[in-house]
Amino acid sequence: MHALELAQQIKARFGPLVSEPVEFRGEITLKLDDAERIPEVCEFAKKELRFDYLVDITSIDNYGDDPRFTLVYHLYGYGHLCSLRLKAELSEEKGEVPTLTSVWRTADWHEREIYDMMGVRFRGHPDLRRILMWDGYPYYPLRKDFPLSGRLTDLPEVAFTQPAPLAGGPFVTIAGGKDALSREPRVRIPETDALETNARLERRQDIKAAHGRSHGPGPVGPRPLGGDHG
Amino acid sequence: MAEDREVLLPDVAGRATEAAELQELQGEKMVLNMGPSHPATHGVLRIVLELDGEIITKATPDIGYLHRGDEKIAENMTYTQFIPYTDRLDYLAPLANNVAYVLAVEKLLGITQQLPPRCQFIRVICCELARISSHLLGMGSYAMDVGALTVFLHTFTEREKIYNLCESLTGARFTTSYTRIGGLARDLPPGWVEQCRQFCKEVVVNIDETETLLTRNRIFVDRTQGVGVISREDAIDYGLTGPNLRGSGVEHDLRKTQPYLVYDQLQFEVPVGSAGDCYDRYLLRIEEMRQSVRILNQCLDKLPGGPVNVPDGKIAMPPKDRVLTRMEELIHHFINVTQGVNAPPGEVYFGHENPKGELGFYIHSKGGGTPHRLKIRSPSFVNLSILPKLLPGHMVSDVTAILGSFDFVMGECDR
């Protein structure tokens, strides 16, 4: 596979900095040990391996784990039509990586979006301002500890600070919750969410072990009379 | 007798240099706030323009007025529940968004190869109808922005027919939510194929008529040719996609280079521009619509029979009559609704050639029915990021032509 060869070339050039290429669903992922060296690797990928198009930059919040953030870069080459994913991890205390704007100018808005949504700063960025939220907004909404219902922000005489009519939303679903209230809560709380998710995954594992398949009936147990809706 | 005189007008680059050179000699510059509510900004885009007379010296786009937190919302619901939200990204081509999203989820599930042929053909038909619809509207409003109102009414009439087709296909004109993971919400209604064929015949006439209104229209050409020129290098560097990229001479179309669905079985050309100006982008969209009609005709001819959903009850909903009569289907239905499809842990990125460019979904899954992170790579967001580079040196009146030729949608840009 061609993309794999290109990934091997990066691996050969940077050695222990870069992990072995991982393939999943036909996509090649390389993991970088040190987020500080992202521009260096990208520069090499662009100049030597002709990855001339930066498709996207994304961030992931691994709330509860350390390092907390993962940055994901998608690269593509118009010459060889191969794509490659680079990943690097970043701790919350550091919260800063060098910018890619000197390599691809399209990185500008992507990085501003990550700064806006996740609070990761990009050193050397020419214009690191919020892009989707307004200037002076104090939170980072895509972090897992930011509630879906939102938080009130004070903008006296500029905007109202009452909860929105559907704040918290009736449309939240935590798949596989044990009853209707935990499946469709009014507000999500990340701490209990994580517990909920783990419990659900364990339950699935148990069912899988018992029946030899992933789908099966949920846990059977005594149910309170009158149903879940109270 | 009038005397012939040659008048030299500086081009865009010349005006930009002049503006920079004269900076010290200038008096105060004027700051003009364009938008967020302006007819030419097609939604809620705000651009702060710094002007020297009529010439733009600096442009700062301000986006986010339509931000709804779609990515956050996606983390809080099952994969199937997010499909209606994709209607509201590029709301001028909801069918294409639906297809793009489910293809990403199916890639994560690893069932792309199992999709029934009929489902794949119908999805291609949906995508191309969406492309025609989006381009018709984009072109109409583009022409209106540069002063040709008739075109807008003309293309809108044709677009109405697509919405009628959508309505009989999906039950909704705008918010279609037509696709499902592993299939479609429903099969084609009886007689739909004939209606679609009829539409294909009519839309070609409409495209030709639109061309006669614009392609050699002196005013239109004057306002678009040589305006908003994007070089090939800039287009790639700023990550432009779709017609805006191809207008600058890069021959890249995900339908050709990374074929998905049945695009590799269909014959069509990818038009490419040469100058990279507003006029090229217009010509390109016209040609893309013709190619879409070509694809539509082939799909309607080749449309195979058979089911539209994968036969796996753990992925697609089992048929309702079986749910009500059989135990296993009932369990599948129940699990699908309460827990969602059981996606494996892993991550995928799927890029789809949407009418506006590359719409990509990056899904990071920790397993289970909900994505841990879902990122939407929207073409409008990336395409607009070139504005601070492109606008300086142009006249204020060129802004409308450039924005029109970009054909962006803020619902998708702000997500």
Image (cartoon, rainbow, N blue to C red):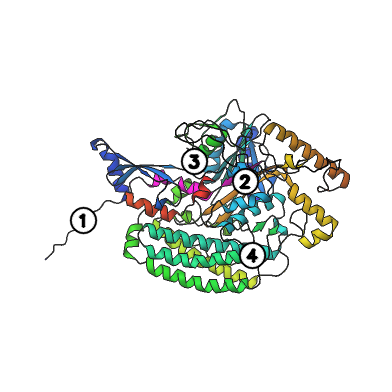
**Does residue B386 show up magenta in the picture?**
yes
Residue at coordinates 64% horizontally, 31% vertically from top-left? A68
- Closer to the camera in the image, A14 or B171: B171
Real-space Cα distance between discs 2 and 3?
A: 17 Å
Q: Which residue is mark 1?
A: B7
- Same chain for the residues at labels 2 and 3, yes or no? no
Q: Residues within 10 Å of mark 2 (few under 14, many from 20)?
A: many
Nearer the observer, disc 3 or disc 1? Answer: 3
Write the start and end of the magenta stretch as one range.
B371-394
- Regarding residue A172, the answer to whether it shows in the image is yes
Tag 4 residue = B122
Looking at the rendered structure, the kind of residue marked 1 is: Val
Residue B89 appears left or right of A207: left
Q: Earlier in the sequence, mark 4 or mark 1?
A: 1
Disc assigned to residue A109: 3
Up-down relation of residue A172 to residue B39 (above or below) = above
